[in-house]
Image (spheres, grey):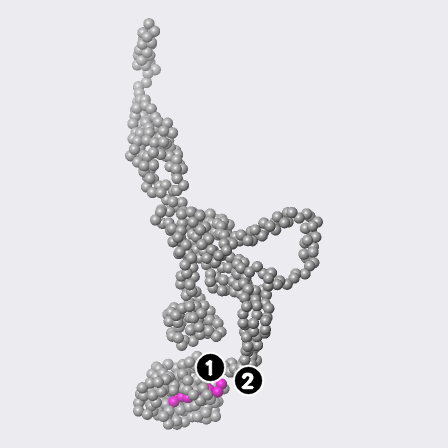
Amino acid sequence: MKIAYIKVAAFASFVSVFFFPSYQKLESTGDNIFTVYLNGTQVGIVEDPVQVDSCLIAARKRLAGTSDELVLADSRLSYEGSEVLWGTVDDPSVITANMTDVLQNSVKETLNRSYTVKINEYTVNLASTQEVLALLQASVNKYDSEHEYYVDLVLDGDRELNVLTTQIYSAKEQEKEDMEAAEVMSRAGIDAALDEMFADVEPAKEKDFSDYELGLMSLKFGDTVEVVESYLQNYELTSLQDAIEEVTKEQEKEQIYEVVSGDTLSQIAEKNGIPLADLIAMNETIENENSTIRVGDELIVTVPEPELSVERTEEIYYEEDYEAEVVYVDNDSWYTTETKTLQEPSAGHRIVVADVSYRNNEEIGREILKEEITYEAVPKIVERGTKIPPTYIKPISGGRQTSGFGRRKAPTRGASSYHKGIDWATPVGTAVMASSAGTVAKAGWGSGYGYVVYINHADGRQTRYGHLSKVLVSPGQTVAQGQKIALSGNTGVSTGPHVHFEILINGSQVNPLNYMN
């Protein structure tokens, strides 16, 4: 009876739906349930596609949490809607789990968490901070055989982004600071005050040679090091061994060398360990080994230097013979080209403690802390002139050099096979000027020279101008530098219109090109 009652009640309810006056006809409202697909695989059913976004985000977080690396995976979402009277939807946790499984099967690549080290313009990628520290420590250990210094990475406070830089610590200094701090803490107030008072009153005692510690005193990197976290593929990483080789090996790098007094091109090449021919090739301003260089000139040189330079200071003890500085006695009546040695030098001997500064293996500074002279050096005494000597200029404007100074084949009968001057071809009548100020010693006919002019100069030198067509000065006349003294010609033993020019020192001809400005 109970079963029959239930059936009747259900039937009555069903009939009332269709026959009661409040009945409304069902109308289509469109898709109201959606099947979700990720990368073509069904992962669940939802009422609204908007709900899927949070599930995908949660699935990505789960995938990322399975590794310390950066994981890239495809995530193409698609939906298939339908209209139903009733149906079931999946719980978001189920959809998230299904999505995680699909993403794990769709991983494209994994980017390793790594670290990029930048040293000036050089960069290298390493797998971990441990490898970064090992690379930097290798540069330090090259000069720290006792392993007293160690490298650490610290946040660069001058940068807005998270960029690491280096800090080098001294184990010895750290230990010393810790001991001093402990000593200060252990001393009572009155004792500490008395110690400080007596330390101020007691005069500092001069150190003996045995009081110096000697050895490596400080060490730092000579280049800026920046370290940033990055995500890279395996092939973009460099092995630690290769990185150490690249960073620590010496390579030829260009630097600027400033010419100092006494320098010659060959000395500069030898000082920097490069062939003279290479030095000339690197500098466009140098034509050959005879080119003139002046104090203050800047030349390009190459020096062996690693990618990461290390600067250090060592306190060293040594004994050496030394030379006293040259003592100069000025003579205002002499030219600066004139010198005379009044006393020959003699080396002395000394023992020294000094702080020597290096950049890599090159010494860049030396400060003597204590010096004891065993026996004094005797200085060299030199008398030198203070007057600026005359300058020499080309005696004509323009012209084409047709014969240089030195040995040659005689160009015409009667001419010498050793040319004692410089010839410039120029039309007859070209103005010939005095190369330097002086007094005319000869003006007129000079046999093989044709018409010639000789001028004596204040520094004892003499200039000669030959094969002239007309002489415009006379013996004993004073002339200024650049003053017209003659016209060019083709007189004497000559092969054509030109000017022959000589400079004589102590009566002997020298190459004029070495003395003209």
| Screen quadrant of the C terminus | bottom left
> Which residue is found at the position 46% from the left and 61% from the top?
360
Mark 1 or mark 2, whichever is nearer to me: 2
The magenta-colored residue range is 459-466
Towards the viewer: 423 or 65: 65
**Quadrant hosting residue 508:** bottom left
Question: Element at badge 2?
Answer: strand
Q: Which residue sits furthest top?
A: 1
Tell me where residue 292 appears, x and y as whole percent. Answer: 43, 76
Lower position in the chain sequence, tag 1 or tag 2: 2
Q: Residues within 10 Å of mark 2 (few under 14, many from 20)?
A: few
Disc 1 residue type (three-letter): Thr
On the image, the x and y values in percent for residue 472 come to 42, 91
- The front one of 201 and 123 is 201
Q: Which residue position is annotated with label 1? A: 391
When the figure is inspected, residue 321 is found, relative to residue 200, above or below; the finding is below
The answer to whether residue 480 is seen in the rendering is: no
- Horizontal side of 61 relative to 193 (left or right) equals left
User: Is residue 460 shown in magenta?
Assistant: yes
| Rendered image: mark on residue 333 | 2
Left or right of 54, for residue 143: right
Q: Position of residue 203 (x, y in %)?
A: 68, 61
Residue in view at x 55 percent, y 75 percent: 347
Of residues 306 and 405, the one drawn nearer to the viewer in this rendering: 306
Give the Cα distance between marks 1 and 2.
17 Å
Q: Main secondary structure of the magenta part?
A: strand
Which residue is pictured at 53% across the width and 53% down the height? 170
Q: Amino acid at mark 2?
A: Ser
Residue 190 rendering spot, x and y as whole percentages: 70, 49
Query: Is residue 17 something one can see in this rendering?
Result: yes
Name the quarter where the N terminus is drawn.
top left
